[in-house]
Image: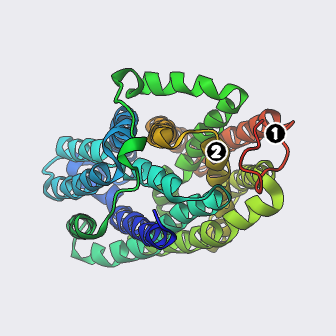
């Protein structure tokens, strides 16, 4: 690709990711209410089902992400990305019409199958990025998600006045419009002569895990990615319940807070991730993000009952965790051939999905059990974050150990551990 075409392609991919995240962000504020309605129980009681609904998406994405990544290495990024975007639109329509909890879970399962646009988009970014720009461009993916989460939850909070299902219809429209847009303007990034034969043994979760072994010591960074997403799931799965139960926040309050998180993630990943990787190196940037995340998880636990405003003080430090993923992806992407980038991003997405499978049920179980067994204890609200802090600390230790002999290599794309 020429530099001009590369820039145009990068802009389109970022717009695609942004629109996808708008669609996802729209549904987040009202999602607990829809789970409550379709399950026929109270909001608090619905917390035991919420993890199952969230886990359905992650489980299917875990199964299908290696397949999607390998298919994009064989047939190109464009057709796979477009199918993923269209599938997301269908998913939102299924959830909009869901008459009961079963159909809601089915809708999330469909979303998991087709919701691998991140995998293909990340491979697309790797295709068109120079080695020295790769960390910055991977960070831009996160920034695009962040911008979407500024707009999405804010719209979702406003749409909640029209019922808990209205955001899902709007999300479907966003996704399907995005599909039509991509159909017209998206160009292919993987040349025919760079494509490789499709191998089913590499296109499944087990095959993806086995492929990690070829990275030798660097394979432990995949474990760090898994622990990072697992830690973040404590926030993603319990933020609504924690703030509504402990501080009495409304759906609109949750939407506003998520919009602020999106702004901060956009600032960190668009403006700081590439800068911090250049200044601190991949090891330093990842270490900073994980240690900050560890301390923050502990801090959230001890916010007093009447101080909901303090949650806003935690947001920017929390978003510093966004520098970890670009640093790790950059390190491993440099050691991967162009026609294997889809497979590599499929491995990352599978690990992320595995964290999303385990995280929501785990943290919602911790939350539900703590609230039931210790209803009068303030700490019962924050026990999921306390558990998550242990995962963040383990990830920090693993980064320091894996990269203990690593020399800062941001300006040397051929540097290997």
The residue lying toward the viewer, choosing from 186 and 40, is 186
- Note whether residue 248 is visible: no
Residue topped by disc 2: 334
**Secondary structure found at label 2:** loop
Residue 45 placed where, x, y %? 36, 46
Mark positioned earlier in the residue sequence (1 or 2): 2
Quadrant, the N terminus: bottom left
Pointer 1 local density, CA inside 10 Å: few below 14, some 14–19, many at least 20: some
**For this rendering, which residue is in front, 378 or 81?**
81
- Number of marks drawn: 2
Name the front one of labels 1 and 2.
2
Residue on which the image places disc 1: 400
Horizontal placement of 406 versus 46: left or right? right
Q: Which residue: 34% across, 30% down? A: 198
Residue 305 in percent (x, y) is at 62, 64
Q: Is residue 90 left or right of residue 347?
A: left
Relative to residue 405, is residue 236 depicted above or below?
Answer: below
| Mark 1 vs mark 2, CA separation in Å | 20 Å
Q: Quadrant of residue 90?
A: bottom left
Disc sitting over residue 218 in the figure: none
Element marked by disc 1: helix
Query: Quarter of the image holding residue 166?
Result: bottom left
Residue plotted at (83% across, 40% down): 406
Q: Residue 43: x, y in percent?
A: 35, 54
């Amino acid at each position: 690709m020429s530099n001009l075409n590369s820039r145009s392609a990068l802009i389109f991919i970022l717009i695609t990711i942004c629109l996808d995240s708008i669609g996802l962000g729209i549904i987040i504020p009202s999602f607990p209410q829809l789970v409550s309605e379709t399950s026929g129980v109270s909001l608090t009681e619905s917390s035991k089902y919420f993890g199952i609904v969230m886990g359905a998406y992650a489980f299917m994405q875990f199964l299908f992400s290696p397949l999607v990544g390998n298919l994009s290495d064989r047939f190109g990024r464009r057709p796979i990305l477009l199918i993923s975007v269209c599938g997301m639109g269908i998913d939102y329509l299924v959830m909009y019409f869901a008459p009961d909890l079963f159909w809601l879970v089915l809708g999330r399962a469909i979303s998991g199958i087709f919701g691998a646009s991140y995998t293909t988009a990340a491979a697309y970014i790797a295709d068109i990025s120079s080695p020295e720009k790769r960390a910055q461009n991977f960070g831009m993916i996160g920034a695009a998600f962040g911008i979407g989460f500024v707009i999405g939850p804010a719209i979702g909070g406003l749409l909640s006045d029209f019922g808990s299902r209205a955001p899902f219809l709007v999300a479907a429209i966003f996704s399907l419009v995005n599909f039509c847009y991509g159909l017209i303007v998206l160009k292919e990034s993987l040349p025919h002569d760079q494509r490789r034969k499709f191998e089913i043994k590499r296109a499944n979760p087990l095959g993806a895990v086995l492929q990690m072994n070829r990275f030798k010591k660097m394979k432990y960074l995949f474990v760090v990615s898994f622990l990072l997403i697992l830690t973040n799931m404590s926030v993603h799965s319990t933020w609504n319940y924690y703030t509504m139960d402990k501080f009495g926040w409304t759906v609109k309050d949750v939407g506003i807070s998520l919009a602020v998180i999106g702004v901060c993630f956009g600032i960190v990943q668009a403006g700081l991730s590439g800068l911090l990787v250049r200044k601190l190196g991949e090891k330093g940037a990842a270490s900073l993000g994980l240690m900050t995340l560890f301390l923050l998880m502990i801090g959230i636990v001890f916010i007093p009952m009447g101080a909901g405003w303090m949650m806003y003080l935690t947001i920017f430090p929390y978003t510093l965790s966004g520098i970890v993923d670009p640093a790790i992806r950059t390190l491993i992407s440099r050691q991967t051939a162009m026609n294997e980038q889809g497979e590599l991003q499929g491995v990352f997405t599978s690990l992320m999905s595995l964290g999303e499978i385990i995280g929501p049920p785990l943290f919602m179980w911790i939350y539900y059990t703590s609230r039931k067994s210790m209803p009068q204890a303030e700490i019962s609200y924050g026990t999921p974050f306390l558990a998550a802090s242990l995962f963040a600390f383990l990830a920090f230790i693993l980064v320091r150990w894996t990269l203990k002999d690593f020399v800062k290599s941001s300006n040397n794309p051929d540097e290997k551990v």
